[in-house]
Amino acid sequence: MARARYIMVGGFLGAGKTTAMLRLGEHLAAQGVRVGLVTNDQSSGLADTTLLSASGFPVEEITGGCFCCRFTSLTEAAERLTTRVTPDVFLAEPVGSCTDLKATVSYPLRRMYGDNFSVAPFSVLLDPVRALRVLGLEEGRRFSDKVLYVYGKQLEEADVLVINKIDTVALARLAVLRTALRERCPGAVLFEISAKTGAGLEPWFAYILASEDESRANLDIDYDKYADGEALLGWLNCTARLSGRAFDGNDWLTRLVETFQRRLRGLDIEIAHLKMTLTPAEHDRDLCVVNAVSADAPPVSPFRLQDVIDAGELIINLRAEGDPEVLRREAIGALTAQAANAGLALTVEHIEHFRPGRPVPTHRVVMA
Ligand SMILES: Nc1nc2c(ncn2[C@@H]2O[C@H](COP(=O)(O)OP(=O)(O)O)[C@@H](O)[C@H]2O)c(=O)[nH]1
Ligand SMILES: [Mg+2]
């Protein structure tokens, strides 16, 4: 049997991994290539899984830890997808606060499952506005140094650096970022894309579909610092049911995101990624998605409901640099107020808040 291709698309929270994977999935499906997707998070109830499933792709979700720490779950998820659809290509999205993924995922896959998978070079996506701030090229809200350490390691380990969202920045700003990245990551192949408009996607797709992962000296990484940086990020996942009278779900969800952002801005908490989905009770293909990738960035809604709804399921995924207790309190506050505003009954079905635990990879293949 021909080996399936394993393509991992990494990058910081909110960089556009899910959006780009969806585009790649559509590109492949249009050519009759079978695709299976794997999402990953520290806990369950993922907006990404809801979004990708609603797009019609077979998705397996790995929860409770990242790929590197749950390597066996990754290969099991691949087996389940194989049973379901026998994918020619697996597209996998690691957690956006993870790094050292070549040593802990790509190399072990090649070494132990080389007969099953041909592994693509590792792509790391970045949001240009975030990157310009992180690299100190522009002013704006930033994370603390330990979080930036993880961000820096993500850039450093990229085989392929992909500046995404080029539709959001002027050419001059893009040029500044390109120059800085070339200097900082001379070994990486650079692409510039917009997963939203489709600009620049073809050359990147062609490259990752055709090239093989190459061994490089391992990332020089201090796992204590990495763990500290990851643990500064608070995680909140919430699933809730709304019901009552007919309401405009698109408008309602955008206001909820704005309310939540305002509350977090007031506490000087920077958001890495806040994403919400609202799915009507009766249509599993219709949904609204609203995202914010910073406390001060305007919310965007890449998917919108066709019609007003009178009942729905809400998912909130927040990753922000703040105390998880505070994130929970503010989430409940924003949600209760926004439900009351619209005269809706609210039932919180599941809520979790925590800091990611120390990364302890299942395997770490060391290259000289
Ligand atoms: N303007 C613009 N927005 C994008 C682009 N790619 C992704 N986004 C938006 O960025 C946000 C985060 O995207 P997502 O794919 O969820 O990021 P992930 O956390 O890396 O998986 C969402 O609101 C997307 O709609 C792009 O090329 N241009
Ligand atoms: Mg995602």
Image (cartoon, rainbow, N blue to C red):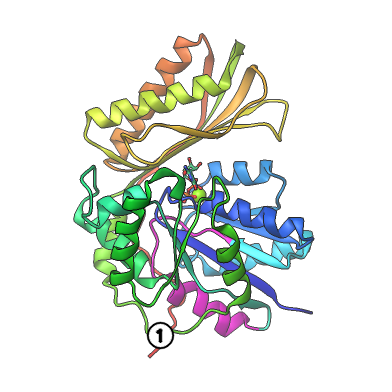
Q: Residue at x 65, y 77 (%)?
A: 117
Residue 340: quadrant of the picture: top left
Q: Is residue 51 above or below residue 195?
A: above
Q: Say what amino acid the circle numbered 1 marks.
A: Val
Which of the two residues, 191 or 91, is positioned nearer the viewer here?
191
Q: Is residue 332 left or right of residue 149?
A: right
Q: Is residue 117 above or below residue 70?
A: below
Q: Residue at x 38, y 22 (%)?
A: 334
Q: How many marks?
A: 1
Q: Residue at x 43, y 47 (%)?
A: 14
The x and y percentages for residue 17 are 50, 54
Residue 236: quadrant of the picture: top left
The x and y percentages for residue 352 are 43, 40
Q: Is residue 74 left or right of residue 275?
A: right
| Residue 196 can be seen, yes or no | yes
| Residue 236 can be seen, yes or no | no
The x and y percentages for residue 107 are 50, 80
Q: Residue at x 57, y 71 (%)?
A: 207
In the image, which residues are magenta? 92-114
Q: Secondary structure at mark 1?
A: loop
Would residue 102 be counted in the magenta stretch? Answer: yes
Which of the two residues, 11 or 330, is positioned nearer the viewer here?
11
- Of all residues, the one furthest to the bottom in this rendering is 368
